[in-house]
Image: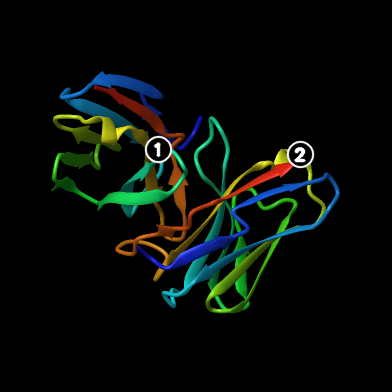
Amino acid sequence: KNEVEQSPQNLTAQEGEFITINCSYSVGISALHWLQQHPGGGIVSLFMLSSGKKKHGRLIATINIQEKHSSLHITASHPRDSAVYICAVRGNNDMRFGAGTRLTVKP
Amino acid sequence: DAGITQSPRHKVTETGTPVTLRCHQTENHRYMYWYRQDPGHGLRLIHYSYGVKDTDKGEVSDGYSVSRSKTEDFLLTLESATSSQTSVYFCAISEGPGQPYEQYFGPGTRLTVT
């Protein structure tokens, strides 16, 4: 079993829909990251959080440390949000990554 | 954007040949990492460096070696490439090993071993 599990693996939505991507982990962490990878491969960090909730524009990330679970929400989704979203957990010296959720938003 | 470049960006090589991938940073970050990304798997750590000449193994280090002779450069070498090493390789940098330090990723190198 992977230490970081994401669901769903693939997600197709219509423009404007509210989207949720989930991440569960089984190890102790110092922080959790949400990353975005566009076609063409570049990886950028969206959020780093260790408790509570963070919001940036239409993106919201939450984490429940007791449940070892995090969610990434996208409100009013847009085709430009189409990408692979990756959850990663930070230990003391390393990061462990989920396999990613491929999101496609159709106009 | 963090100043990280990888070279080459694409490479096709034959089984048994040596291959070296280069990661170059202009941020003066202490930590550098090499990951590989394969379908169905998350990014997996190959090796990392916590300073000049200081390196350590990651989760999938077999068949790979690294060197860091300067702060700005981290080299990944496949001594004798195999088809199982066909992958996309990402370099990342960080000021420190854990929170609150972000990891910043390079653009990736797509390696095909035929």
Q: Amino acid at mark 1?
A: Ser
Outermost residue toward the front in this view = A107
Give the image location of residue A1, x and y in percent: 51, 29
Residue drawn at point x = 15 percent, y = 24 percent: A16
Does the image show residue B6? yes
Q: Position of residue B113 (x, y in %)?
A: 75, 42
Q: Which residue is under mark 2?
A: B83
> Is B105 displayed left or right of B17 in the figure?
left
Where does the image place residue A84, in percent across and percent down from the top left? 39, 35
Q: Vertical placement of A81 versus B46: above or below?
A: above
The reply, left or right, for residue B27 in relation to residue A47 is: right
| Depth order, front residue of B81/B57 | B81
Query: How many numbered callouts?
Result: 2
Residue at position x 47%, y 44% from top? A41
Q: Residue at x 44, y 52 (%)?
A: A95
Instruction: Say which chain tag 1 marks.
Output: A
| Same subunit: marks 2 and 1 | no
Image coordinates for residue B87, horizontal then vertical, percent: 63, 42
Of the numbered discs in the image, which one, if any, rests on residue A26?
A: 1
